[in-house]
Amino acid sequence: MAWAGLEPTVYELSGEGGTQVSYATIDVQGRAQLLYTGPHGERAYPEEEIDARDTELGREVTVTLQADEDEDMVNLTLLIPPVRMGEEGAAPLETIAVLTTMLSPLTGPPTGQDYRYEVLSLRGRALSAGL
């Protein structure tokens, strides 16, 4: 029998290069939060710094890893697919994150593309709030 009452609220993922991402749609204070650890440092993003949108691909969750007007800007976009939870309150999850590097006018090439993309494979689990 399918357990329809649980919705995932926490996504714990890890992948290439020591990247770890934890995204909570609602934390203990009732707000969204994303934690990132990886090649671009370690940081906690509060709800007001997270852009989360439901799209045809799933939920796209974007944060800015690096922003300096004299350097390249780097965003991380985590793709979260719909997840069916079992009654144990957890489900395995495989997804991707896209690192988008927006080249600064000071460091970018005189011609060519201004954005570079890197796709990271991530694995982990989706959890319901009760865990």
Image (tube, rainbow, N blue to C red):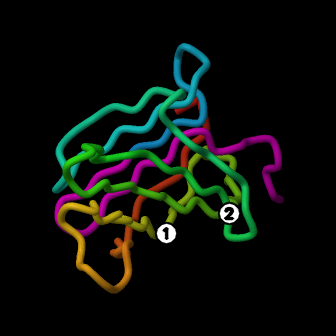
Percent position (x, y) of residue 89?
61, 44
**Disc 1 vs disc 2: Cβ atoms closer than 8 Å?**
yes
Residue 117 visible at all: no
Judged left or right of residue 74, residue 89 is right
Separation of disc 1 and disc 2 at Cα?
A: 10 Å
In the image, farthest residue toward the top? 29
Point out the image quarter for the N terminus: bottom right
Q: Tell me: residue 7, above or below residue 81.
A: above
**Quarter-wise, where is residue 108 in the image?**
bottom left
Q: Amino acid at mark 2?
A: Gly
Judged left or right of residue 110, residue 17 is left
Sort mark 2 into few (<14), some (14-19) or many (20+) by Cα contacts within 10 Å: some
Label ID, residue 35: none
Is residue 4 found inside the magenta-colored segment of the image? Answer: yes
Percent position (x, y) of residue 128?
61, 39
Q: What segment carries the magenta color?
A: 1-21
User: Disc 1 marks which residue?
Assistant: 95
Give the mark, 1 or 2, whose residue is nearer the N terminus.
Answer: 2
**Quarter-wise, where is residue 67 in the image?**
top left
Q: Nearer the viewer, residue 66 or 129?
A: 66
Q: Which residue is depicted at the point 20% across and 61% down?
A: 106
Q: Which residue is depicted at the point 25% across and 57% down?
A: 72
Is residue 67 found inside the magenta-colored segment of the image? Answer: no
Q: Secondary structure at mark 2?
A: strand
Percent position (x, y) of residue 105?
28, 63
User: Disc 2 marks which residue?
Assistant: 58
